[in-house]
Image (cartoon, grey):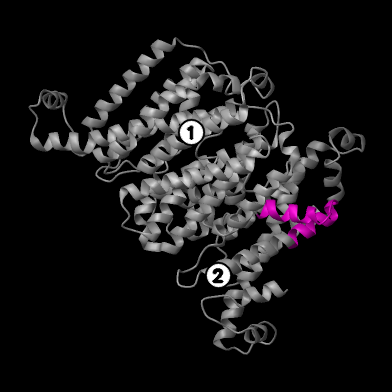
């Protein structure tokens, strides 16, 4: 109650506490009373309802999956609901007008089903489920970003909602959500004994007459409905479904009869408290969405939870990607084919664009007989972009390969374990403080951010002997924290971050020979080093025991591999921004073709990564010329379908 009253006192207009209490219990029709009753009370009501819904949904998700890290965010439901709402507003707006909850619910259900189907292979572990959820969320977020670029006018009203905002202008949302949250929440509470039985294990539950399939289906349906409804009203807000249930369990609650209402209360407290903090910091900056502040608290809590929960290491099966044998095509032939494809992509990149050329014109350029304008365009504009694309793509690909080998999971990569977002946070921070910062300062900021994340993840995971499970989960939490920091800086800085936003989309626009000089030393030194280190990567793929028997110091080997991966990713990100999926997709293409030997994987992954970014850069320049699509969005468009298929195949 005290927190709710404090929440009502927050806002752009200062209203004293007595006026707030009077407006609630004895309204006098004054302007301040109208503000409290028409704007702030609905905001508090929707915060309490949706926070309670997310808290209860988190309990149900963790029960049905028996995974302490399950929530609407980690299962992809938030991203699925956001994507479905975005797509509906563009292509079938009448559907959204008729049933916004139905649209969000459909997206949430489909995303959760996809995550569970991908994760439910031979071994369903907390790591695999969480990484699958994060990967699907990344894929859906990329698709959403692509739609937002192409249909900016139709979607101009949902950006604040997409960041997770509690802003209300009347009671309509609260009146809409109240019965739709209360009814499934009541059903969930009445079925508490059924949920308790689920936690006893399948054999015991069956012996007690429980229909496991039906019970799990009902539990999942209620949880997804509560989460999707909340997303449809206030946007995707993460971590409440993780924080609230665990706070309740720390208090000693075990039965769902007490877990569910207590998690609802704590979920409301967490969301209202976070909104108070957001409103406090909003002065002078406009409204800061609460969705950007929750992860700043939720991510450290998740890190603490990962360090505390010893069960996370048990039952975590290593990924088969590192040891999976591809079709073993001849390695020399594949290498030559990849180089040939890069050559074709390079010719296309240099030839195509607003100023296109015929084969004869291009041959004249090679012979030195082309016009001065055409020569300048190719050698000063297109060729530097091409070289930067090749260097950045190869760096990101090998970075992803190293991380997948260390974590022993096919869905690890610089995007997922926090390295890319750490570099992004460093760049945004320097650009907000110094909008005119030099290119060198931006590069240094990216390196500092990436290595700071690496140091933090390493320090936390070192306690568990750099276990792959904890390494990946801590990386996910740190990535969420950095992403929230980026969003907060973007909101706070407002118009001063235009340069940062372009950089965050991932672009090779206006790259020149100086950028090549800054970037090239890193891949030229570290890619051969990764190739030399390849035999140790082969040994790490065999598990924990055999490498130790052979005298390999796993902690040092992992630290060295991650250091190379971080340096490669930071170098690429500092030059071209956050280009996604290259570090995830390129290593898998190489693995499918040559199997698991890293002496062959490192060169092939580098070649395929270079090819992917070069093709993405060319397509981004010519598809909507003279405008451009950032390379990061093009790689997402190319990589998302393949990556989803790859996730399904890795079951």
Q: Which residues are magenta?
A: 240-265
Quadrant of the drawing holding the N terminus: bottom right
Q: What residue lies at 77% left-to-right and 44% top-to-bottom? A: 63
Would residue 18 be counted in the magenta stretch? no
Question: Few, some or many C-alpha atoms within 10 Å of disc 1 (few <14, some 14-19, many ≥20)?
Answer: many
Mark 1 touches mark 2? (CB < 8 Å): no
Which residue: 36% across, 16% down? 337
Where residue 107 sits in the image (x, y, percent)? 58, 46
Residue 154: tell me if it is visible: no
The secondary structure type at the circle numbered 1 is: helix
Q: Which mark is residue 189?
A: none
Residue 205: x and y in percent read 87, 37
Where residue 211 appears, as percent x and y from the top left, is: 84, 37
Q: Is residue 49 left or right of residue 478?
A: right
243 is within the stretch colored magenta: yes
Would you call the spot at circle 2 few (<14 residues within 10 Å), some (14-19), or many (20 or more)?
Answer: some
Quadrant of the rendered structure where residue 314 is? Answer: top right
Which residue in the structure is indicated by mark 1? Answer: 565
- Residue 279 image label: 2
- As drawn, the residue found furthest toward the right would be 208
* For residue 574, above or below residue 428: above
The secondary structure type at the circle numbered 2 is: helix
Q: Earlier in the sequence, mark 1 or mark 2?
A: 2
Nearer the camera: disc 1 or disc 2: 1
């Amino acid at each position: 109650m005290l927190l709710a009253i404090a929440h009502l006192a927050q806002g752009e207009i200062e209203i004293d506490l007595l006026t707030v209490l009077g407006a609630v219990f004895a309204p006098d029709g004054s302007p301040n009373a109208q503000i409290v009753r028409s704007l702030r009370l609905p905001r508090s009501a929707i915060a309490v309802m949706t926070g309670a819904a997310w808290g209860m949904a988190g309990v149900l998700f963790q029960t049905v999956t028996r995974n302490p890290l399950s929530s609407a965010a980690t299962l992809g439901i938030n991203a699925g609901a956001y994507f479905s709402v975005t797509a509906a507003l563009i292509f079938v707006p009448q559907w959204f007008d008729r049933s916004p909850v139905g649209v969000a619910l459909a997206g949430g259900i489909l995303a959760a089903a996809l995550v569970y189907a991908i994760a439910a292979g031979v071994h369903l572990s907390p790591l695999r489920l969480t990484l699958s959820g994060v990967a699907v969320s990344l894929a859906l977020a990329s698709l959403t970003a692509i739609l937002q670029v192409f249909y900016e006018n139709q979607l101009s009203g949902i950006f604040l909602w997409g960041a997770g905002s509690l802003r209300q202008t009347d009671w309509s949302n609260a009146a809409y959500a109240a019965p739709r949250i209360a009814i499934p929440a009541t059903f969930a509470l009445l079925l508490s004994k059924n949920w308790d039985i689920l936690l006893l294990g399948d054999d015991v539950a069956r012996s007690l007459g429980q229909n496991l399939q039906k019970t799990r289906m009902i539990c999942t349906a209620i949880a997804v409905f509560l989460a999707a409804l909340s997303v449809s009203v206030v946007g995707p807000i993460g971590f409440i479904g993780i924080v609230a249930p665990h706070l309740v369990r720390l208090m000693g609650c075990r039965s769902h009869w007490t877990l569910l209402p207590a998690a609802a209360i704590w979920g409301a407290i967490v969301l209202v408290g976070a909104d108070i903090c957001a409103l406090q910091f909003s002065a002078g900056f406009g409204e800061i969405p609460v969705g950007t502040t929750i992860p700043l608290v939720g991510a450290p809590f998740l890190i603490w939870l990962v360090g505390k929960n010893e069960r996370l290491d048990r039952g975590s099966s290593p990924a088969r990607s590192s040891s999976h044998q591809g079709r073993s095509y001849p390695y020399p032939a594949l290498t030559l084919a990849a180089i040939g494809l890069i050559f074709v992509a390079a010719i296309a990149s240099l030839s195509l664009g607003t100023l296109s050329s015929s084969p004869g014109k291009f041959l004249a350029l090679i012979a030195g007989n082309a016009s001065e304008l055409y020569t300048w365009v190719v050698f000063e504009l297109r060729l530097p972009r091409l070289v930067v694309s090749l260097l950045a793509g190869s760096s990101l690909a090998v970075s992803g390969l190293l991380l997948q080998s260390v974590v022993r999971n096919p869905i690890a990569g610089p995007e997922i374990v926090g390295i890319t977002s750490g570099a992004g946070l460093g760049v945004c921070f320097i650009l907000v403080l110094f909008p005119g910062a030099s290119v060198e300062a931006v590069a240094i900021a990216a390196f500092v951010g990436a290595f700071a994340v690496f140091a933090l993840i390493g320090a936390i995971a070192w306690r568990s002997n750099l276990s792959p499970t904890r390494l990946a989960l801590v990386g996910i939490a740190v990535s969420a924290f950095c992403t929230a920091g980026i969003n907060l800086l973007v909101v706070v800085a407002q118009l001063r971050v235009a340069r940062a936003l372009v950089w965050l989309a991932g672009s090779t626009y206006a790259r020149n020979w100086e950028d090549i000089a800054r970037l090239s030393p890193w891949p030229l030194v570290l890619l051969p080093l990764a190739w030399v280190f390849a035999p140790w990567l082969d040994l790490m793929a065999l598990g924990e025991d055999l490498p130790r028997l052979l005298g390999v110091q796993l902690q040092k080997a992992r630290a060295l591999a991650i250091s190379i991966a971080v340096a490669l990713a930071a170098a690429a990100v500092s030059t071209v921004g956050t280009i996604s999926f290259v570090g995830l997709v390129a290593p898998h293409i190489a693995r499918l073709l040559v199997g698991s030997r890293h002496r062959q994987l490192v060169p092939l992954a580098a070649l395929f990564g270079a090819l992917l970014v070069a093709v993405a850069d060319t397509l981004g320049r010519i598809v909507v010329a003279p405008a451009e699509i950032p390379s990061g969005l093009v790689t997402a468009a190319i990589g998302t379908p393949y990556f989803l298929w790859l996730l399904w195949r890795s079951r």
